[in-house]
Structures are given as structure tokens and as C-alpha cells.
Amino acid sequence: MDDFEREFDEVIDRRAVPALKWHRAVLGEGGEKLFAAGVADMDFRAAPVIRQALQARLAHGVFGYEAWPDALVEALTGWLAARHGWQVAPEQVLRAPNVLNILSIVAATFTAPGDGIIIQPPVFFDFADVIRENRREILTNPLLFENGRYRPDLAGLERLAARKEARMLFLCNPHNPVGRAWSREELGEIDRICRAHGVLVVADEIHADITLAGHVHTPFASLGPGAAANCISAVSPAKAFNIAACCQAFAIIPDAARRQRYQAESSRMNANKNNAFSSAAMVAAYREGAPWLAAVRAYLGQNLVLLRTRIAAMEGVELVEPEATFLAWLDFRALGLTPEALTAFLRREAGWAVTRGEAFGPEGAGFARFNFACPRSRLEAALERLQAALNAGG
């Protein structure tokens, strides 16, 4: 066993810090004994190179205002080119506190109150919140679920995009919670439809670097010059390197006029400041983190094998096979429970704290999102508890 895997196997007390995933704000009162699998982060320490970079920055001892380091943009664009074949010019990269902040800025900048923004549920619940909070209209184009696999409803997208109020599409790529790594062909059709109807694509690609065996991530803007010109991409190392609490994000905007407008709105909102520790962590991740990322992806792959094997032996639950992310979309509809009863069953009988499926839209009723990025011993114990609960229920 290598050093990385030894670290992944270690059970760390995350309650020693106010970790959201394990906090009563998420688990509720009396949630101390639950298996926390709701919030989308990993229960692993950050890569040693990141921890070392943070320690070195701390040792400097001066924490005054800092400019955005040139090394960070170089590290990011080098990573995107090497990992995804995506050539991004440095001037196209703008900073932001986080990916959701980017979505809020682009909604406020490139649409008007009452305009429509398309989402494809079941999808990350904060998409709808961003749209509502910016007083825009949510246009829903649900994914199609056939033979245990999701795909985009391209005919539905064409109809929605043709509506006069449709101005923007929030694209989750890879998709949270269903775990699809959209194919180049699927993305190409989305690009064709959106450009034909003047719909701007905003691609949330925060899970880009967590693809599972046999699957690859295609950045939307890498499809070609036309797609890039009609796209704003939101990227961050937060998920892949488990540094959400000390990380920022990047808006990649190839169109110069759009970039200028985004920059002006970001400045107006004062959302363009820097954090010394975030910069240090992100430079280290993009420059030196590849070996750790390869190891964590392998570990997640082994966790997925365990999850797949155990779920296959259970009555009343099915795994929707993920292609990316460390989030499993579990189908409990065969149990015949209401969404409220399913949540209660998982919490009280199995001891699971997961994200309820209907949080991602009514299309998620009967499903639950389960985070399997944890030490394997904890995953094994959680699956034992689910099996016992299902046996008792039967």
C-alpha cells in the first residue's frame, strides 16, 4: 500500500473543525451518529504538496493585500492544456470567490429580470437558487432516464431555447447528481441548439477532474471556436483536490466584450479580491498535484466497485452508474416510499445522512445522492447498515 492510500484509509475526525458535512447545521440535532454522505467534499486530507505550500506561505508570516500571482494563471492554463487538451489564453481567465459566484455574476450581467435560464434537472440545487435570487425565470428541461442511464432531452432543449425569454443555459458538466460525463456528441448538439437560438452556455465544470475509469471530461469550450465564443466556463480545483475551504474559482471567457462586462460587474460587487492561502493551494494543486489526484481517483474507483457490488445484492435499491464525480445517484423508488418516508427510513433505520433526491428537482423524488469519497472501512460499515435496514424493512 502506498502512502497516499494509507492516508485515504485513515478515519479522520472532521468534527475537530466546523466541517459542514459533519455539522449539526446539516445533520440536525441528534445527528452525531449518522453516516455523513450529503455534502460534496471528500473525507481525505489534501495532497501533501498542498499542505506543504500552505505551511511555507504561513511561515512567511506577512498576510497583507496580495496581487493575483502570475504563477496561478500559468499553472491553470498548463493544467487545462495537459489534462483536457483545452488551450486557454491567460487573458481569458478571470478570478472569482467560487463557482456559484460566477453563476450569479453572469446571470446578473447577461440576463435581465424576467429572462429565462434553462436547467436540466435533476441538477445541483443551487442552480435554481441562483436563478430565483436574481429574479430570473427557471426554464426546466428534465433529463431523460432510460435503461438506467440519463441523457439530455435535445428536442426539449430546442423547444425551450426557441422561446423569446430564453437567454442562458446553466450546464452541469460533469453532471451533479447523476454522474454523467457528457460525450462530445451530446455537448456538440447542445452547442448547436444554443447558438442557433442565441442562448449563452454557462458551463459549471467544477467536477471536471474527477472522471471514473473509461470516461473522459470534454470541456464545453474546447468543442471549437464557435462554442468557446458562446460560453462562459466556471472551473476550480476545489472538488478534485478537496480544498473547497481554501480555494477560489476561475471564469474563463473567450469573448472579449463579454469578458469586459463580467469584469465590470465583478468589480462592482467587489468579488475580485485575493486570498494568499487559496493562491498557494491552487498553484501547488495544478503544478504538483497530479500524482495525488491519480491516486485518489484510483481509490474512488475501488470504492465504486465496493458500492456497485453491495448495492447489486440489495432488494429495493439500484445504482445509477456514475461516469464522473464521487457522488452516487441511488434509486430507491422500488421501495414505494414517499420522499419524506424515504428520508426518514435512511436516517432512522440505516443511519444515513444523504442529500434527498427531490432537492435536485421533482424528477429526483425516490432517489438520494450518496457521497462515497470516504475511507473504505467507513463505506463498508455504511453499506452494512443499509443492508440491515432493508432486511428489517422487508
Image (cartoon, rainbow, N blue to C red):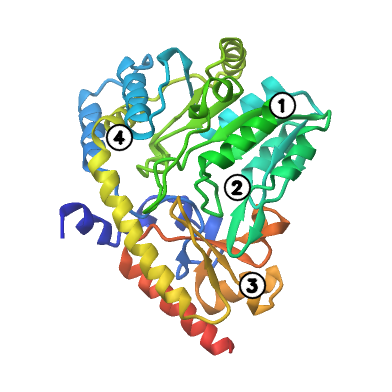
Q: Considering depth in this image, is 133 or 310 the residue closer to the camera? A: 310
Query: Mark 1 sits on what residue?
Result: 196
Query: Mark 4 sits on what residue?
Result: 285
Amino acid type, callout 1:
Ala
| Label 3 or label 1, whichever comes before in sequence order | 1
Query: Mark 2 sits on what residue?
Result: 124
Q: Is residue 152 visible?
A: yes
Query: Mark 3 sits on what residue?
Result: 342
Mark carried by residue 340 = none
Label 3 SS: helix
Amino acid type, callout 4:
Ala
Label 2 SS: loop
Tell me the quadrant of the picture where the N terminus can be found: bottom left
Q: Quadrant of residue 374?
A: bottom left
Q: Residues within 10 Å of mark 1 (few under 14, many from 20)?
A: few
User: Closer to the observer: label 1 or label 4?
Assistant: 1
User: Closer to the observer: label 3 or label 1?
Assistant: 1
Give how far apart the Cα atoms at labels 3 and 1 are: 42 Å
User: Closer to the observer: label 2 or label 3?
Assistant: 2
Q: Residues within 10 Å of mark 2 (few under 14, many from 20)?
A: some
| Label 1 or label 4, whichever comes before in sequence order | 1
Q: Are discs 3 and 4 less than 8 Å apart at CB?
A: no
Tell me what residue is drawn at x 73 percent, y 40 percent: 157
